[in-house]
Structures are given as C-alpha cells and as structure tokens.
Image (spheres, rainbow, N blue to C red):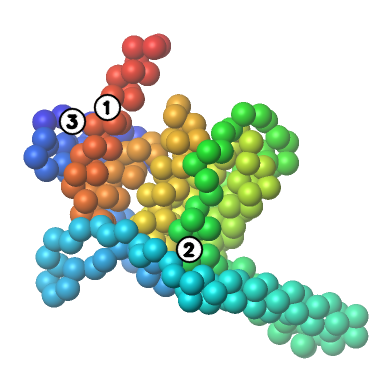
Amino acid sequence: MFSKTIRINGAVVSCVGLVVLSTGCNIDGLWAHHRAPKGPVTSATHPEGDGASNKAVDIAIADAQEVDLVERVIQHRALYHRALEQLRDHYQTRGDATKLAWAEFELKGLRGVKPFRYLLDSEIPSDSLRPIEQIAEADAMYERGSELMRRGGHGVPGLYRGDLMIQAAGVFRELIERHPTSDKIDDAAFYLGEIHKEYLPDQETIAVKWYERAWTWNPDTPHPARFQAAVVYDYRLHDRDRALELYQSVMRHEDSSAHDG
C-alpha cells in the first residue's frame, strides 16, 4: 500500500493505492454535470446494464473507408467555415446589419464546437516533440489559452462556460502545431488533457493521450500529468493495471526529484 497527497487546483487531495487494486482520487462529482454535451463518443466503452466494471479498449484501427470519410468531413468543415466568413464580410460591406448579425452568431456557434479529427494519430501529435526554446508568440498563445480557461470556470464549477473551454483547447492545440519546439508544449498538452477529462463527455482516451504527451515531451513537467492519467485509467476507463503502473510512476518520479534536490 502507498499513500499520496497532491494539490489539484488549490485543493489538497489524499489518495491511497493498493498493490492489488489501486484507487485514485475520484473528483468526477465536481464536474460531471458541467461537462459540455458536445462531440461524439470517441474512446471508452461503457458498461451495459447497471454499471458493471468495464475495461478500456483501444480505438479500432481505421480502414480506408473511414480515412476517406474523415478527410471529407475535415475538408467540408473548412470550406463551410471559410464560406461563412465570406458571407459575413459580404453583409458587412453591404451594410446589412440583420444578416451580418446572423452570420456572426453562426460563426460564434462554430467556435463553441469541438472539432474532432477522429483518427487518433491525427488527433494527437507525435511523441517525438521536445520543448527546447522560449518563443514569444507561443508564450502569448499559452497565456491566452490559460485566460480562456480561467474565464471558462476552470476550478470553479459554478462559473463553467463550455464555449470558452473549447476555444482554450483550440488555442493550446494551435500553439503545439505552430510552435512544436516551444517550452510551453508540455504545459499546453497537460491542459488539453484537463479540458478533455473534465469538460468534454466521453473523451477519456484523448485525455490520457494528452497527459502522456505532457510527460513524454518533458519528463520533468511541473504538472501532475502522470497522476491525472492514472485517475482517468482508474475511475473512467477501469484499467486497474495501467492505473497502478502510473501511480507507482508518480511515486518513483517524485522520489527521484526529491533525491536530486
């Protein structure tokens, strides 16, 4: 048996892990009713009936038909967004205030929808990235994403706004894509894990992948990425073996850090 105390969002949480069955820190109750009902089920299997234990499963390998359909969705999504922006600009030029307001409202709605890439290799960047330099634009994007999360109620369930959380995820993702060598990529990956874990339904597999990228890109990341991934595996995906492995990794990493210090 081992015990663990960790601070998450200002709160001190104690956890206990057993050799046979690990138990993490289940804080789902704080956020379950706030998660935005947007986006498809992409990962975890759900138990049928009355909540029997279920195991996490891998997403099926995409076949040619799926790849083709996903590519078409992404292409048409981009065309739709571009055409809507052009329509908005047209109404603005003509001075048609009513239709301009309609187009702006529709564009605002698009910004509040989490677009998926559906193929996990496309959804999550390569694990070979490394945060090796400070980049001013990336720093500014990180601050913007953090501010959107704060305004969206991160850590304060009563202030939750799903549209702002989704916008924050978009900013963090863009940061990683545009600046893959920035020293903020592991920070952005961690908060993408937080957003997918806490605020989007049925995104557990994506969440743990983002947490994994945080510590893969930066083994000394200051964020509790390993621990949060363990909690997801433990309470959401019911993969006790993987959860225990990660709980033990947290302990080893902290012991090593303390020894180095």
Label 2: few (<14), some (14–19) or many (≥20) C-alpha neighbours in 10 Å: some
Q: Amino acid at mark 1?
A: Met
Q: Name the residue rendered at 11%, 31% in the picture.
A: 1
From the viewer's perspective, is 69 left or right of 107? left
Q: Residue furthest front?
A: 64
Which residue is under mark 3? 3
Q: Which mark is residue 119?
A: 2
Q: Position of residue 184 (x, y in %)?
A: 59, 37
Residue 243 visible at all? yes
Q: Nearer the viewer, residue 67 or 189?
A: 67
Helix, strand, or loop for circle 3? strand
Q: Around disc 1, counting alpha carbons within 10 Å, would you say few (fewer than 14), some (14 to 19), or many (20 or more)?
A: some
Cα distance between the residues tagged 3 and 1: 9 Å
**Amino acid type for the residue under numbered disc 2:** Leu
Task: Find the distance from the CA under tag 1 to the CA under tag 2.
Answer: 33 Å
Picture residue at 14% right of the left edge, 61% below the top? 53
- Of pointers 3 and 1, the one earlier in the residue sequence: 3
Decide if residue 153 is on the left or right side of residue 135: left
Q: Is residue 26 above or below residue 15?
A: below
Q: Which residue is mark 1?
A: 251
**Which is closer to the viewer, label 2 or label 3?**
2
Quadrant for the C terminus, please. Answer: top left
Say which label, 1 or 2, has the lower sequence index.
2
Q: Looking at the image, is mark 3 or mark 1 nearer the viewer?
A: 1
| Secondary structure state at the residue bearing disc 2 | loop
Q: Which percent across, then down, holds residue 129?
A: 56, 38
Q: Earlier in the sequence, mark 2 or mark 3?
A: 3
Can you tell which mark lies on residue 152? none
Q: In the figure, 175 relative to 12: above or below?
A: below
